[in-house]
Structures are given as C-alpha cells and as structure tokens.
C-alpha cells in the first residue's frame, strides 16, 4: 500500500523479504533528495549554512518531532549524532565526584547497558536492575523498587529492544515513580512506532530517541526532549552556548536556556535533513503514528497467521514473547487488543536454534535479526502482507 514511497530501497533489494525494519529501517525516497539538498545548501551558503540550519531547518524539524510526541515546546528538543552522547551528557549533570545511584532494568539497549556497567566497574555508579520478566508484573515491581530506595537517576525503556514489550501508559507509569531522581526514557523503539503523548511529561522527564529506526531518517539524527531546569552538564560542546556565545562571562561557561543546553559540537546535519524529509512526508501523506501503528499490527497479524499455517516446531506462537497479544481461542494476534507493543515480534528459543533459523532464513532472502536467544521479526509500512513467504522453513521442520 505504501511501497511507492520506498522504491529506491525496494528496487535495490528485489529478492529480499526485509523483517529487520526494527534494526535498519528502509528510508523513503525523499531522503535521497534531502541528502542532495544538504549538499546544495552547503555549496550555496558554506559557513552561512549554520545560520540557516539553526534559524530554519532545525526549528522545522523540532516542530515535526514535537507534533508527533505532543510536546508543547519544540525548543526542548536537542540533537546529537547518537543517544549515547546524550545519555552521557545527562550523567554529567551530576557533580563530578558523586557516585550516582541508578535504577534501571536488565533489558536496556547496549549504549546504556555497556556505559553503565563501565561506570560501575570504575565505582562511579551504583546500579540496581529490575528484571523485565515476567512482564505482567514489571511496572508494579519497577515502581516498588523505585520507592524502596533513594535513587539519583532512573533510566528505563518505553519499548524494550530485546522483546518488543512496552510500558502501557507512560504517563501513568511515571506518576508511580518518585519525583526527586532524574528520569530518562529510552524511546528509540517507541518514537514514530507506537502512539506517544508527552504532554504531561515534557516538563519532568528526559526522552531519548532518533531516526535510525521508525522515523526513517537513518543514522546520525538522534534527539532528546529536555525537561524544565537550568542544567549545566560537564560534558558540553560549543553548540550549547548558542545565543550566549558573544556574551561569555569571565571564568564562567554559559549555557542556553532550553534543550540546547545539552547540545554538543559540530555534527553532520545531513542526517537531520533526512529526518525532516521523512517526517514532512508522513505529515503530507497523512501517515500519523496511529495510522502506521495500525498498519503494522495488521502486518503482524498476517505474519502470525502465515506462520501458524506452516506448523513449524520452533517458530510458532508458543515461543512468541508477546503472548498477551494472542487470542486464547485461536492463538492469533488480536487487532482489538488495546495494549501497546513494539513494531517487532520476538521468539524466544535456544541460542543455537536462533542462530540456525536466522541463517536459514537469510539464505532464502528473509532478513531478520537476533540477540542471543531471541529471534526478532520487524514490520513496516513498506511491507505487503500478501507477499509474506516463509515456505523455506517447511523443508527443515
């Protein structure tokens, strides 16, 4: 239905069934023009392009992101090449010698998992991890852990990368947590995938995401929504002083008064051009997050029905992690289900079975991705569910 928007990627990979959308999403065709636009703007303006970017292109992109997240103040949004840079900058708002006490989970993406464990190794932080499974009780258990001790920083995903399981009501969940700690939501698998309303949260939480996945602008355009407060991160770049650059006080580093206070330094803005192009396209095409999410759910339903017909001994709904999505009567995805879940389905198997299945599928042009004992299938609006074909699995039941 929407494949006409992705002709360049689809034509370049004609014999591929791409189920790794949650990993590297295809880019719409308009992003190629955005790359050329960035080059042309650079040729026309050279150094002056920065004035244009900060006065025009960046505010336009902030507004598109803010609209998708229902954020009332687009200026809260700051850009960076990756979310790792942003989370390290948030950590640097604490005093340099402070041992930061962090509450998190056992299912955070590698950028935070690796960095936090390295901080722990250097005795810079204290880590408390709440297991996400069993997920039926996760939100309650996490809230109880948050109230049981005094934490400096709470870091948790909106949608967990290793399962697709999602916090159901982000605002209600945040209200169960104490107000004193800094709260950071990793929204990378949530932004432009599941409907997200930050109107009640924008003043109190950090929300991290980017365009590599569902926003479809590719790598290099990540962002944070910054809550109220005059922060002075130690890890700072000269972009964070824009607006104050020529009024520096002797002996004092200046910071902007909005999201830009968390900015870094010179970065390749072509990624932001691509992000702007994709979000602008979705707005013009009427492709809201709700529309996209509904289409993806229908793709997931078609996929599970196709899978059930194969009757594979391993790749079947009994090994699906998102069991709450299944109708008990017929073991298929319920479109009437009001619960939120990510845009990928995860099957939990023995690690050697996961690797074997992923290899077998890849050899037949079915591209997935896997993490340890979890095989993930992603879905997107450039899918046509009628084209799904996993018959290659039938030969090796």
Image (cartoon, rainbow, N blue to C red):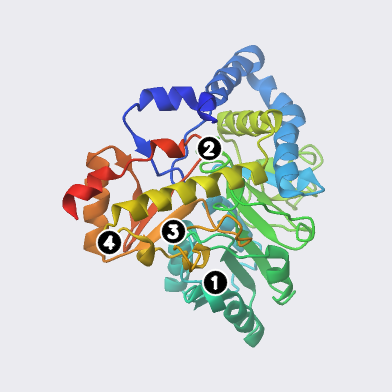
Residue under label 3, please give it: 110
Question: Element type at marker 2?
Answer: loop
Residue at (51, 36) in percent of width and height = 218
In this view, 97 is above or below 32 = below
Residue under label 4, please give it: 314
Question: Element type at marker 4?
Answer: loop
Q: Distance of mark 4 from mark 2, alpha carbons? A: 27 Å
Residue at (35, 49) in percent of width and height = 369
Q: Distance of mark 4 from mark 1, alpha carbons? A: 32 Å
Q: Earlier in the sequence, mark 4 or mark 1?
A: 1
Count of numbered tags: 4
Measured from the top left, where is residue 386 in percent x and y? 43, 37
The answer to whether marks 4 and 2 mark residues whose Cβ atoms lie closer than 8 Å is no
Q: Does 132 sit left or right of 362 as displayed?
A: right
Q: Earlier in the sequence, mark 3 or mark 4?
A: 3
For residue 149, what is the image quadrant? bottom right
Is residue 99 or residue 394 the one in the foreground?
A: 394
Q: Residues within 10 Å of mark 1 (few under 14, many from 20)?
A: many
Q: Does 171 sit left or right of 105 as displayed?
A: right
Question: Can residue 197 be seen?
Answer: yes
The answer to whether marks 3 and 4 mark residues whose Cβ atoms lie closer than 8 Å is no
Q: Does 192 sit left or right of 355 as displayed?
A: right
The answer to whether marks 4 and 1 mark residues whose Cβ atoms lie closer than 8 Å is no
Residue under label 2, please give it: 381
Q: Earlier in the sequence, mark 1 or mark 2?
A: 1
Q: Residues within 10 Å of mark 3 (few under 14, many from 20)?
A: few
Mark on residue 55? none
Q: Which residue appears farthest toward the top when viewing the image?
A: 44
Q: Earlier in the sequence, mark 2 or mark 3?
A: 3
Q: Nearer the viewer, mark 4 or mark 1?
A: 4
Measured from the top left, where is residue 50 in percent x and y? 68, 27
Is residue 112 or residue 378 the one in the foreground?
A: 378
């Amino acid at each position: 239905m929407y494949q006409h928007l992705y002709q360049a990627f689809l034509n370049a990979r004609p014999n591929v069934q791409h189920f790794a959308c949650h990993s590297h999403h295809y880019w719409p065709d308009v992003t190629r023009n955005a790359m050329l636009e960035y080059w042309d703007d650079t040729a026309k303006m050279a150094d002056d392009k920065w004035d244009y970017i900060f006065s025009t292109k960046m505010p336009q992109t902030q507004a598109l992101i803010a609209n998708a997240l229902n954020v009332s103040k687009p200026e809260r949004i700051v850009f960076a090449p990756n979310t790792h840079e942003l989370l390290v900058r948030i950590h640097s708002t604490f005093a340099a010698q402070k041992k930061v006490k962090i509450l998190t989970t056992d299912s955070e993406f590698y950028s935070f998992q690796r960095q936090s464990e390295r901080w722990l190794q250097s005795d810079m932080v204290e880590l408390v991890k709440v297991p996400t499974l069993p997920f039926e009780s996760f939100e309650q258990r996490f809230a109880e852990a948050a109230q049981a001790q005094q934490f400096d920083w709470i870091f948790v995903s909106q949608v967990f990368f290793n399962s697709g399981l999602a916090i159901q009501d982000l605002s209600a969940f945040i209200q169960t947590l104490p107000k004193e700690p800094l709260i950071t939501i990793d929204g990378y698998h949530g932004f432009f995938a599941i409907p997200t309303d930050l109107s009640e949260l924008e003043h109190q939480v950090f929300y991290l995401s980017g365009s590599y996945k569902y926003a479809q602008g590719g790598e290099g355009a990540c962002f944070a929504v910054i809550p109220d407060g005059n922060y002075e991160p130690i890890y700072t770049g000269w972009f964070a002083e824009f607006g104050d650059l020529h009024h520096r006080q002797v002996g004092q580093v200046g910071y902007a008064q909005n999201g830009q206070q968390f900015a870094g330094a010179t970065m390749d803005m072509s990624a932001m051009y691509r992000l702007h192009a994709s979000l602008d396209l979705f707005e013009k095409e009427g492709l809201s997050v709700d529309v996209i999410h509904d289409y993806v759910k229908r793709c997931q339903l078609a996929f599970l029905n196709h899978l059930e017909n194969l009757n594979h001994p391993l790749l079947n709904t009994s090994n699906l992690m998102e069991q709450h999505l299944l109708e008990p009567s017929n073991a298929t995805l319920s479109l009437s289900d009001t619960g939120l879940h990510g845009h990928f389905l995860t099957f939990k198997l023995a690690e050697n079975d996961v690797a074997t299945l992923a290899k077998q599928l890849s050899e037949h042009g079915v591209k997935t991705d896997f993490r340890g004992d979890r095989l993930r299938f992603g879905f997107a609006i450039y899918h046509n569910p009628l084209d799904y074909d996993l018959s290659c699995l039938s030969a090796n039941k």
